[in-house]
Image: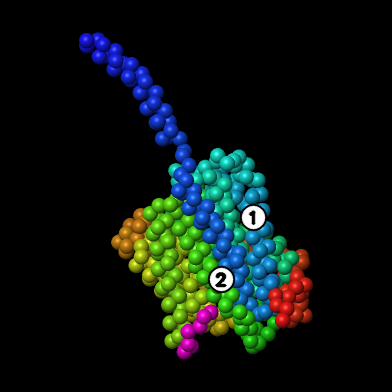
Amino acid sequence: MTLRKFAGLGALLSIVMPGIAMAADEVAAPVLNSGDTAWMLTSTALVLFMTIPGLALFYGGMVRSKNILSVLMQCFAITGLISILWVIYGYSIAFDTTGMEQGVVNFNSFFGGMGKAFLAGVTPSSITGPAALFPEAVFITFQMTFAIITPALIVGAFAERMKFSAMLIFMGIWFTLVYAPIAHMVWSGNGGLMWDWGVLDFAGGTVVHINAGIAGLVACLVLGKRKGFPTTPMAPHNLGYTLMGAAMLWVGWFGFNAGSAAAANGTAGMAMLVTQIATAAAALGWMFAEWVTHGKPSALGIASGVVAGLVAITPAAGTVGPMGALVIGLAAGVVCFFCATTLKRKLGYDDSLDAFGVHGIGGILGAILTGVFAAPALGGFGTVTDIGAQVWIQIKGVGFTVIYTAIVTFIILKVLDAVMGLRVTEEEESVGLDLAQHNERGYNL
């Protein structure tokens, strides 16, 4: 009887053990998560929605009626150009980790390898994420939308005066030498220069907003002021478009920030919450600052405050708590208001649509305050234990980005100006870029 029991147990184990081994293999193998995939697909669409039509309308409403098509055209053309460059080499420069080693500074600390050029090796079965949760194709497209909106933001600084041909070439070179390398340094993982420093940038405060804001400031300085600025009135021609664009940016930003969690999880949920809180606080902060300073709150002001809050919370969205988001948003609304109005007027530069005043200043402020409010002691969810040390790391990351972007952008613009010229003629500027550059009118009244 006893022998038969052992024999039966042996037979049972011979059946069960292969199944247990197979189950272990299945657990160890990367498994696609349909929920995470669905969220990343949605986030990708939301971020693209931020540029076309969101940013296009936001900027388009702020220019004069004779230039609206030029702004819309620039946003659409940038979307097409950067999509193709991202596929050819941009994704590889930003995210290929060949030659990278944590703690070792070499060429690949600044530029990724070319192992992913032309999306080599990417198939429907390629998956990525913290635990290989969604298709690599989705990650590529998600990051592509970030690469698209960053150069498009620069358009706001030189609106109404840059040649379309020069703009296209500038954006292609700038994307190659500035955006993709900065993205690599911050986001590519161990071995990336600013990643190894410990810079916190959850969704692009450094990579997107400081990058674009500083490039915009350099561009408006190199091109010079618009004809008639600041004595000629240059009021926005359709603030309805601007408000609709701001609303689209607000909605799309949930994909921008919450999507950067790269999963449908608690981090994404908190990123969504703090994004809403900071944006609302910044909108009210700008509105009340303008109300007190100028006597009346404006639609343009509250729309600008919305974007300032969205910008400032971007680097912090994955690590700060609700109260930290409230402080960051309120600070962004007030500080960006004074920088976009008082500072610009005093220094006299013509940042047409406040690309630097909102994205540059808001990005710098948000990046630094991330180092403060990511600390659990102040309600954050990061691993920051020494606030002073983390703030210094954030400042170092901001400083490097500002210097690198400013120098490279200046060189690109000066070379292009010498080779082909950057500005339209005075006559073309007077006529408007819609007719002068595209032979079309935005309105036939």
Looking at this rendering, what residue extends furthest in the left direction?
A: 1
Tell me the SS state at disc 1: helix
Locate residue 118, reporting x and y percent.
Answer: 65, 45
- Would residue 293 appear left or right of 346 to someone viewing this image? left
The answer to whether residue 167 is visible is yes
Picture quarter with the C terminus: bottom right
The answer to whether residue 214 is visible is no
Q: Amino acid at mark 2?
A: Gly
Which image quadrant is residue 234 in? bottom right
Tell me the SS state at disc 2: helix
Based on the picture, tell me whether residue 99 belongs to the magenta stretch: no
Query: Which segment is the magenta one?
Result: 293-300
Which image quadrant is residue 372 in? bottom left
Q: Which mark is residue 330?
A: none
Classify mark 1: residues with Cα within 10 Å, few (<14), some (14-19) or many (20+): some
Q: Are marks 2 and 1 in contact (CB under 8 Å)?
A: no
Pointer 2 residue = 245
Q: At 63% across and 81% down in the image, what residue appears? A: 237
Q: At 53% across and 65% down in the image, what residue appears? A: 209
Locate residue 308, reporting x and y percent.
Answer: 49, 71
Picture quarter with the N terminus: top left
Q: At 60% across and 64% down in the image, what residue appears? A: 52
- Would residue 85 appear left or right of 398 to someone viewing this image? right
Pointer 1 residue = 83
- Would residue 413 appear left or right of 262 to someone viewing this image? right
- Would residue 46 appear left or right of 162 to someone viewing this image? left
Q: At 68% across and 62% down in the image, what residue appears? A: 77
Based on the picture, tell me whether residue 297 belongs to the magenta stretch: yes
Q: Amino acid at mark 1?
A: Ser
Which image quadrant is residue 28 in? top left
Looking at this rendering, what residue extends furthest in the bottom direction?
A: 295
